[in-house]
Image (cartoon, helix red, strand yellow):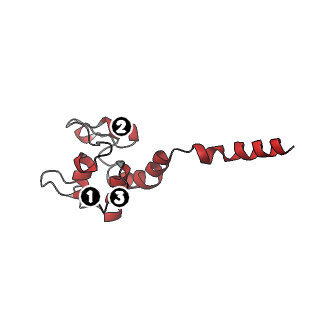
């Protein structure tokens, strides 16, 4: 009887243990930023050949090449664009994102600490 109870608990808890933290982070922190600020131009319209509606599309990049360099946000075009550090590449064109939104995208690039690299 005890083995059955333990098995039931493990089966019930499996989704929590098996959840993909990167996917969860993308869905809860990154996708909302992209929806609010990027989807108008970078979904079906694919301006610059870039589609940002899924992680896979974002990883594929656009006409100018990859926009994400996993583990190296300083060299990821998306981070450069949203940080407004390159005078020729500033996205979204309507204005710089809030620091918390920039941090969300920066951390999604595989970094643990934004403070150490800013």
Question: As drawn, which residue projects farthest toward the right?
Answer: 1
Horizontally, residue 7 falls left or right of residue 81, namely right
Q: How crowded is mark 3: few (under 14 residues within 10 Å), some or many (20 or more)?
A: few
The C terminus, quarter of image: bottom left
Residue 38 location (% of width, % of height) = 32, 50
Distance of mark 2 from mark 3, alpha carbons? 25 Å
Distance of mark 3 from mark 1, alpha carbons? 7 Å
Q: Residues within 10 Å of mark 2 (few under 14, many from 20)?
A: some
Q: Residue 113 carries which label?
A: 3
Total numbered labels: 3
Asked if residue 45 is positioned above or below residue 26 in the image, the reply reads above
SS at mark 1 in the image = loop
The residue that disc 2 covers is: 57
Q: Quadrant of residue 48?
A: top left
Q: Residues within 10 Å of mark 1 (few under 14, many from 20)?
A: few
Instruction: Look at the numbered discs 2 and 3 and tell me whether their residues touch, using CB distance below 8 Å.
Output: no
Instruction: Look at the numbered discs 3 and 1 and tell me whether their residues touch, using CB distance below 8 Å.
Output: yes
SS at mark 3 in the image = loop
Q: Which mark is residue 117?
A: 1
Residue 35 location (% of width, % of height) = 38, 52
Mark closer to the chain start, 2 or 3: 2
Asked if residue 42 is positioned above or below residue 32 in the image, the reply reads above
């Amino acid at each position: 009887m005890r083995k059955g109870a333990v098995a039931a608990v493990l089966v019930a808890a499996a989704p929590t243990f098996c959840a993909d933290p990167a996917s969860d982070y993308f869905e809860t922190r990154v996708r909302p930023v992209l929806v609010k600020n990027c989807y108008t131009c970078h979904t079906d319209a694919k301006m610059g050949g870039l589609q940002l509606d899924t992680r896979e599309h974002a990883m594929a990049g656009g006409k100018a090449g990859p926009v994400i360099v996993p583990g190296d946000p300083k060299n990821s075009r998306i981070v450069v664009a949203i940080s407004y550090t390159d005078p020729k590449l500033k996205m979204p064109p309507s204005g710089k994102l809030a620091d918390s939104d920039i941090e969300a995208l920066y951390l999604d690039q595989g970094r643990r600490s934004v403070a150490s690299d800013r």
